[in-house]
Image (spheres, rainbow, N blue to C red):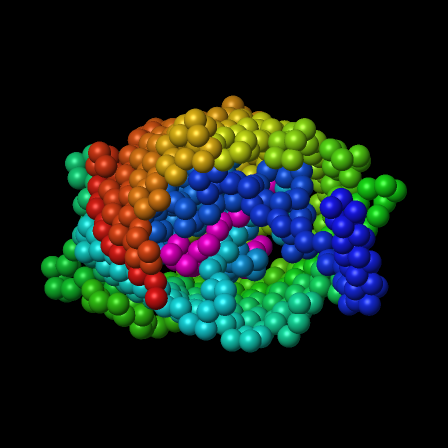
Amino acid sequence: MKIKIIVVAAISLLLFSKGMAQHKDSVKTLKEIIVKGYKTVNGVGHLLESEDGIIYAGKKTEVIVVDSLDANKAINNTRQILGRIPGLNIVETESSGFTANGIATRGLNPTQSIEMNTRQNGYNISAEVYGYNEAYYIPPMEAVKRIELIRGAASLQFGAQFGGLVNYILEEAPKNKPFQFTTSQTSGSFGMFNSFNSIGGNYKKWSYYGFLQYRNMDGYRPNSQQWQLSGFGKVKYTPSDKMNIDLEYSLLRNKIQMPGGLSDSLFKINPKASIRARNWLKSPWNILANTINLTPNDNTTIGFKTTYLFSNRSLVWRNEDGGASALDTIDPATNQFVPREVESEDMRSIATEARFSTNYKLGKNEATLAAGIRLSYASFKRLEGGEGTTGSDFDLSITGVWETNMNFSTTNVAPFVENIFRIGKRFIVTPGMRLEFLKSTAIGYSFDEDYKIITDKSKTRKFVLTGIGVEYKTKPNTAFYGNISQAYRPIDYNQQQPFGVDAKIDPNLKDAFGFNSDLGFRTIVSNYLNVDASWFYLAYNNRIGVVLKTDPSTGEEYAYRTNIANSVHKGLEAYIEFNILKYLNKHSKQGLSVFNSLSFIDAKYTSGEFKGNRVEAAPNIIERAGVVYSNRNFSSTFQFNYTGDSFGDATNVKIRDNPVAGYIPAYTVLDLSATYKINNFSIKCGVNNLADQSYFTRRTDEYPGPGIIPAVGRSFYAGFTAKF
């Protein structure tokens, strides 16, 4: 019996060997596949070392996976969506003349995100990065897949902004489906209705995705109704696994009634009051983008992004004359209102960014080189001081001529290079450099009382930004990191123009410059713990701001825009999230996690007249904490938000007649949201500002004020989403 078994085994082995020999030519060695992804806990994590020709190693980065959050996405509630970013300061003015709340970190100015490099799918969506870096458009959060943030070290690969990068990555076509339709309908307090609808699919080498969003609100305050239509379309062609080409178009259409600002006394009496009923704004936005990605081999990527932005901002309003307390009433002598003022701004910009990245051997280790260049040209036409109608409707017609007619332009050429050097298996060094060439022009006229001032000037700048980052990994998902990078902010168009009837501008304004630095630790343990804590130091020299001065000849007070002084911003940014149920049982189908996002910010002037004073709009403490429960079908988030006090200007006065100056008290806001999902359907609901806290985040002496701009009180929302 044993002999038979041995013989059969021998014959089988011979036949198998013969078969293998006959099929030797048909045997193929499969290519190694490395799966990479964002390591997150409850949708919050950090970026990979490098991706799509961009180096992130050694930098402080965050990734927010939007679909994993319980939040009021119908109105882009920034507190809930981005609130877990430590130190994120939010200026909540969306209900008073803006389509998007502004953000900033580290005690920088959050108004319309002017200190941030704001992007969508990797390209700029603000009007002009260096001339008019204000974000009037951001995509609806129901269309956003994830949000990427990089702190100040982003200046090397994206531009010179002190605040770093925020990049909204939109959803894409579903895989292996020729057609998919998603609809989301939401209603809420103050007449809010939001309808979001998207389609997507793919066929052979083509794919497509698009959405339309319509939103209408009566508003928290009287005279604050608004509607907007957002749209996006993308077509992608992938002829091979080494190349893809896509074309995108984004649009925004809106009409917003602005209820104006309040004085301190009016805000204390009734934060919902409005004494402006004739102020209107529209900001149609259009962005065309073309992307070409090439992958010649496994180690090399080449990418080109070209964008063309053509947009506008126009408003008609009872301007800031008389300040926040001035009533807009009918003149008994004429039985009419006073004529309103009309302003209009046209923005055009075209930009191309080319990026190249390659992995190469350096000794026994692999290194990564990323290089590229940005080429852009932007024009900006500003018309101000047109005498409008005495009516109350949205009418942009004028009588007479414009008091200001200015044409600005900016040309930018910026090559950059950065490299990852790996020393052993754990240590990484990433030096980098960016060369900026800027040419700015200003041509036109403006009136100063009865005098016509002709302007025809240009300014050229050349400067180098350098930086270096380091990272030491003790484990695959645990690292110590540090970086230091230079930053720069040139004088923009707004800073060169008058901003109020009683305002003046320093004729010798200078560009701001400085640097950002981080030293931190981060780790993600399995699916239950996420920690990222770092110390930062930001130097901001020649900081431009507004101070109050008194005219010695008349004794009248006026706002003066100037280089106030140098400032230093330093502090701690820490995020921790711990999932209790996942810790007790990593295979648990339920989750119960607590998170805490905390920032201590010490932002003060270090020179000049206001040495030792706090930088305006820079709270000392920003704390957001919450509890998240989730199971297979249900999730809910309760979030506590605390933002410390700050000041409206560098004088740090608490009470002043001028609306730009004064105290901005600390405030606490509570938010609660929940989502129930079953198959392709979900129901969502929630309460924002649960305790109905009365507070404000901004003072302004012009649009959309003047005065205090109140934030929104308690509001409810509910809706459903279906996917077919």
Q: Is residue 183 visible?
A: yes
Query: Residue at position x 54%, y 59% from top?
Result: 121
The image shows a total of numbered marks equal to 0
Q: Is residue 18 above or below residue 542?
A: below
Q: Quadrant of residue 283?
A: bottom left
Verify whether residue 267 appears in magenta. Answer: no
Residue 542 can be seen, yes or no: no
**Relative to the observer, which residue lies in front, 548 or 211?**
211
Direction from residue 455 to residue 689 in the image, left or right: left
Tell me residue 692's x, y (percent).
21, 37
| Image coordinates for residue 318, horizontal then vertical, percent | 27, 57
In the rendered view, would you say 59 is above or below 374? above
Q: Is residue 448 left or right of residue 220?
A: right
130 magenta-colored: yes
Task: Report the side of 365 relative to 691 (left or right).
Answer: right
Specify the farthest residue to the front: 1
Residue 228: horizontal and vertical position, in percent? Answer: 32, 63
Q: Residue 71 location in percent, x, y? A: 34, 46
For image coordinates 26% across by 60% down, the residue present is 185
Q: Which residues are magenta?
A: 128-152
Please name the residue shown 21% across and 46% down the image: 716
Q: Residue furthest top?
A: 612
Where is the C terminus found, in terms of image quarters?
A: bottom left
Return the residue nearer the eye: 452 or 189.
189
